[in-house]
Image (cartoon, rainbow, N blue to C red):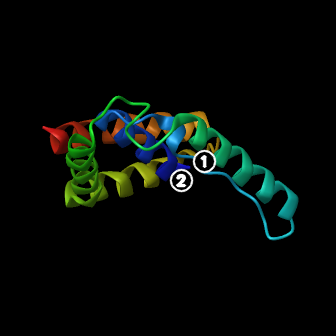
Amino acid sequence: MGMDALVKTVLKEVGIREERYSLQWASAAEAPRFVQLITKFTTEMKALGPLGEAEGIAPDELKVRLQKALDVVSSQKVRISYGNASKAVRKDGIWTREHISEVINTKMEKAINSAFA
């Protein structure tokens, strides 16, 4: 769930709708749930249209923004910050999506902001 918070933060920073990313759990024994999740996500993506279209981003600008997002998540400072935030989550022992997102966003805010600067 920590990666979920990081990806959503980075997408928001580059102007891509959070709905374009979804992280869900389905075990091997939950084939109907898996089909339901994929069908729902596919329907939502079709409704949004091609990447960048719903966001009002031109194709050339989209490439620049996606490259920036890749550079940010690949930076050593952001990766180290993510590792430290993950340790904090484990130490807290609170496994709700809200808590994990809060810790990840709080602990990584400085690293992400400087990476985007």
Residue sitting at x 59%, y 35%: 47
Left or right, 79 with reference to 86: left
Front-lying residue, 33 or 25: 33
In terms of secondary structure, where does tag 1 sit? Answer: loop
- Asked if residue 17 is positioned above or below residue 21 in the image, the reply reads above
What residue do we see at 62% from left, 42% from top? 94
Alpha-carbon neighbours of circle 1 within 10 Å: few (<14), some, or many (≥20)? Answer: few
Judging from the image, what secondary structure is the residue with disc 2 in?
helix
Q: Which residue is mark 1?
A: 93
Q: Which mark is residue 8?
A: none
Q: Amino acid at mark 2?
A: Arg
For badge 1, the amino acid type reads: Gly
Residue at the far bottom in the pictured view: 28
In the rendered image, residue 39, in percent from the top left (x then y), is placed at 73, 50
Q: Are marks 1 and 2 in contact (CB under 8 Å)?
A: yes
Q: Which corner quadrant holds the C terminus?
A: top left
